[in-house]
Structures are given as C-alpha cells and as structure tokens.
Image: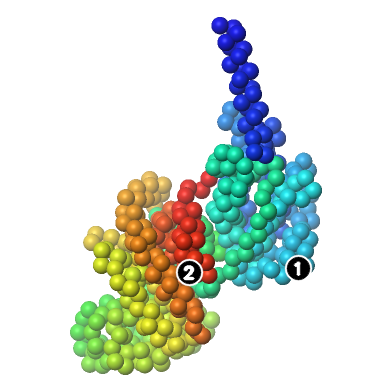
C-alpha cells in the first residue's frame, strides 16, 4: 500500500512539473500574483474603464489560487510614477500623445501607424519579457482596443502556442514567450449606434459596457416619460465612450390618423415646450425624434406627407437651434412613406444641419427574416445618401421589444435600475429566442456584407449605422455581426463572422 502511495505521489509531481513547462507555458502560481503589470497614462473616462476591464479579465486567471483566499491585484504603473518592480511582462496602454513609454516602444515610425479614430495592438517578446502595446487614437479607441485584444487577439494567438494548453483561457498570459503580432483597426463609419426604449434597460451599466465591447459609440434611448437619473446615465455612458441621444416623438402618433385638422404650428409649440422642460434638463449629447412618417399614406392634413414633414421638421428644428445652436438633432425617418414619386426630392430640403436616420429601406437587415427574407434595397439607400450630408441607416434584424405585450411607463422613472433578479429573468427569457435571429445572419450575412460594401464605395458614405438591438446583454451573434459590419467591411464575410462569434463567448 505504501509503495502504491509513493508511486502515486511521484507520478503527480512529475505530471505537475511537465504541465508547468509544457509548450513554453509557465505555472503562474509560484509567482504569487503573476508576472504581468499594466503601464498606463490616464485612469479617467474610457481609459479608466480599460484598466477596469484588464483588472477583471486578466486577473481572474492569474491572480487567484484556488486553495487560498489571498486577494492579489493586477499592478498598475502610471507613466512617470513609481515603477512596479518584479514583473517581467507588461501591457502598455493609452494614446501615444500622453504615454511616453508607449511612444518609446512603438518608435517614431510605429506611432505614425496608430489611426486617429482607431487603435493598434502589438505583441512581442523583448529582453526576456513579454510586451503588449494597445495604442488608441482616442481614449475610447484605447478601450475598444483592450476589448479587441482580450476577445479576439488573445484567443487567436493562443492557438499558435504549442501544446494542448493553448485551448485553455489564460494560456497567453502564462507563456514564457508570446507570439509576435501586429493588428490595426479603423472604423469605416464614424457613428455606430444601439437604439432602444429607455425603460426596458434593466441595468444601464452593463448595457453601456456591452456597447463598448461591440465598439458601439452612441445610444439612442427613446422615452415618453422623464428619466429621473438621466445625468447619472449620461455620465456612465461617457465613461464607456458612448454618447447618449434622448429620443421622443414629434407628432409620431399622427402616423395612423387622418389628422385633417392637424395644426402644425400648435404641434411645433408643444414640442418646443417639451424639449425645454423635459429633454434639455436631462443633458445628453443630442436628441432624436420620429415624426409622422411611419405610414404608407400619401398625404396628411390635406398635404403631401413628405412635403409636410420636411417643412414641419425644419421649422421645429430651427426654433430649437435658435435657443440652443449646439444641440445635435437626428431625424428618424421611415422610408416607407417616402418611396413615392417626389418623396425623396421633398426630403432633400431637410435642414442640412440635421442628420437623417432612415428605417424601412428594404428587406433584410432592415426587417428581421421571419422566413421571408428579401435582399436590401441598395439602389434606394444609395439614392438617399445623396440627399443630405449626414445619412444613417437603422436595422431591425435582431431581438427587439415584445410589442404584443407593450406597457408604457405611467410616469417619470429611474432608468436601468431594475436589479439583478429582473435582469436575470429577462436575459433568460431572451436566450432561447436568439438562435432564430442568429440563423438569419448565418444564411444572409454575406448579402448584408456586400450591401454595406457597396454603400461605402460611393462618394458619400453612411454617417451612421444603428441596430435596434436586444437591450439587455450579453449581445447575441446577430448583434455582434451587425456591430462588426458597422465598424468595417474591409475583411471577408467569413473573417467578420468569425470575430462576431468570438465576441459572443463569455468574458474569461
């Protein structure tokens, strides 16, 4: 019996020794806290969130022993501050303009390759240590780069490490020598948005985090009641690099009515007063509205609908700009009411300072598949791109609010404070519905990829792409497909779909 125990002990020790050195993978436990540190230049705003993400996701695999309760944290070394000793590996993040260490490691030529609106990720081994550089053109781009590094780059490089352990999360950070790799990402569309009713967000904090992970930089939150905690919501969004546009109606309820006696002046007066008393005090980065265009009617109040809405919108927007010239305004327009002779010509007269966000511009992805998939109307989209300087398109090919059981808030409310139990219930309720939308994207994603590439090939490109997405994360494959296409279509559809799938995995 004793001999058997001794043999077993020896075997276990040999296995552990082999595992610790297998394929150049080091056992990290003896280091007590790992071998890595982060070198940063700012802990404010999105760059502070980047440090938060690195602490959470790198730390959970490197800084805890399963048999100890000792709390060990990922060390953060500020450029120009006290040097963290005893760490051979480092992640250096920030904008080159603010991080001198980043500039030195990139070199003069390397700094020039950092895109002004995107980011560069570089990994290499130097002087006995592993180095990761994440350089962003903006603070928000630094955060996008950190997510991309953790979600896509690390798993990809782990497959290049020798041995079966490359398939386990965290192997990259236990490697004696990490692979060399350089990756640059540049957005092809400047504004990438999620549209949602505000009151259905159970937790605005997790929602904005999910948007940042998908490289979404604007949230349009539609409400018909004031948001009591609006300032806190906006502040949180900004820390994740997300703008907030508050959405409300400019006569949208008249879409399904004859409205023979519709008084456009009175309607404009009401909107102006509502903006002054309700939406302006909520802060934010702009306002979004829909008017009476969600209709197939040709006329309203005895007038051509496209002509009427153009005049009405211009008048109301001008009155708001007279009081607040810097207020950004987005006009959510339904193409279904404009696809008539003379419709687009009338809309071309919309105030060019406004952005137009178009819905209903054809088949999938503007509508969900539901077994009746038709190709998007690329020709019409190219036509509307020429109408005004800033044109965006809104897609609906993902899980959305259940309109069959819709109940509007009875009064002012706290947005995104529903609590963990309700959030868990809603996430579970949506989970089994996601695959049907994912299947639409597996079958039709290449067609949408081709559509977006054609829209970006012209002289005037889309200014914005918007997903009317599921409001509570985690985001589905369908939503990540759209976010990837919103960012760029430079790569093949297969590569884009692969990255979307990688982003749907749990955050290790």
Q: Secondary structure at mark 1?
A: helix
10 Å crowding of disc 1: few (<14), some (14-19), many (20+) = few
Note whether 89 is above or below 394 in the view shown: above
Report x, y in % for residue 54.
61, 50
Report x, y in % for residue 290.
35, 77
- Indicate how the structure is coloured in the image: rainbow
Q: Is residue 44 left or right of residue 374?
A: right
Q: Nearer the viewer, residue 227 or 327?
A: 327
> Is residue 421 in view?
yes
Note whether 6 is above or below 284 in the view shown: above
Q: Quadrant of residue 172?
A: top right
Q: Nearer the viewer, residue 360 or 302?
A: 360
Disc 1: which residue: 109
Q: Residue at x 64, y 70 (%)?
A: 115
Q: Nearer the viewer, residue 131 or 444?
A: 444
Mark nearer the N terminus (2 vs 1): 1
Q: Residue at x 40, y 70 (%)?
A: 448
Q: Quadrant of residue 161?
A: top right
Q: Secondary structure at mark 2?
A: helix
Q: Is residue 10 left or right of residue 449?
A: right
Q: Which numbered circle lies on residue 486?
A: 2
Q: Residue at x 72, y 70 (%)?
A: 112
Q: Quadrant of the N terminus?
A: top right
Q: Residue at x 59, y 65 (%)?
A: 185
Q: Is residue 319 left or right of residue 161?
A: left
């Amino acid at each position: 019996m004793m001999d058997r125990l001794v043999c077993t002990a020896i075997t276990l020790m040999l296995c552990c020794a082999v595992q610790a050195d297998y394929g150049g993978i080091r056992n990290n436990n003896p280091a007590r806290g790992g071998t890595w540190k982060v070198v940063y230049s700012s802990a404010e705003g999105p760059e502070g969130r980047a440090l938060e993400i690195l602490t959470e996701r790198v730390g959970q695999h490197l800084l805890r022993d399963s048999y100890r309760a000792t709390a060990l944290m990922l060390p953060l070394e500020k450029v120009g501050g006290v040097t963290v000793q005893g760490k051979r590996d480092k992640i250096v993040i920030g904008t080159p303009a603010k991080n001198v260490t980043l500039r030195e490691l990139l070199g003069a030529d390397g700094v020039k390759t950092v895109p002004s609106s995107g980011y560069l990720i570089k990994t290499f081994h130097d002087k006995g240590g592993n180095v990761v550089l994440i350089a962003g053109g903006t603070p928000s781009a630094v955060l996008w780069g950190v997510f991309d590094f953790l979600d896509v780059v690390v798993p990809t490089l782990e497959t290049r490490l020798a041995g079966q352990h490359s398939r386990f999360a965290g192997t990259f950070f236990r490697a004696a020598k990490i692979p060399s790799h350089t990756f640059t990402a540049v957005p092809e569309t400047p504004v990438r948005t999620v549209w949602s009713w505000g009151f259905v967000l159970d937790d605005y904090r997790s929602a904005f985090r999910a948007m940042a992970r998908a490289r979404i930089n604007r949230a349009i939150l539609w409400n018909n009641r004031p948001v009591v905690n609006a300032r806190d919501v906006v502040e949180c969004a900004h820390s994740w690099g997300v703008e907030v546009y508050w959405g409300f109606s400019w006569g949208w309820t008249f879409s399904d009515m004859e409205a023979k006696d519709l008084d456009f002046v009175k309607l404009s007066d009401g909107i102006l007063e509502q903006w002054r008393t309700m939406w302006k005090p909520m802060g934010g980065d702009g306002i979004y509205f829909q008017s009476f265009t969600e209709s197939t009617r040709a006329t309203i109040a005895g007038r051509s609908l496209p002509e009427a809405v153009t005049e009405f919108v211009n008048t109301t927007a001008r009155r708001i700009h007279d009081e607040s010239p810097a207020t950004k305004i987005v006009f959510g327009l339904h193409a279904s009411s404009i696809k008539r002779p003379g419709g687009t010509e009338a809309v071309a007269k919309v105030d060019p300072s406004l952005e137009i966000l178009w819905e209903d511009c054809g088949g999938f992805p503007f509508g969900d598949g539901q077994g009746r998939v038709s190709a998007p109307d690329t020709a019409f989209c190219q036509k509307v791109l020429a109408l005004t300087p800033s044109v965006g398109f809104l897609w609906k090919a993902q899980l959305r609010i259940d309109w069959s059981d819709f109940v509007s808030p009875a009064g002012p409310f706290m947005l995104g404070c529903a609590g963990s139990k309700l959030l868990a219930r809603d996430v579970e309720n949506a989970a089994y519905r996601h695959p049907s939308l994912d299947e639409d994207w597996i079958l039709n994603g290449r067609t949408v990829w081709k559509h977006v590439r054609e829209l970006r090939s012209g002289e005037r490109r889309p200014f914005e792409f918007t997903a009317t997405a599921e409001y509570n994360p985690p985001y589905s494959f369908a939503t990540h497909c759209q976010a990837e296409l919103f960012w760029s279509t430079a790569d093949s559809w297969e590569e884009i779909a692969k990255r979307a799938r990688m982003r749907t995995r749990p955050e290790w």
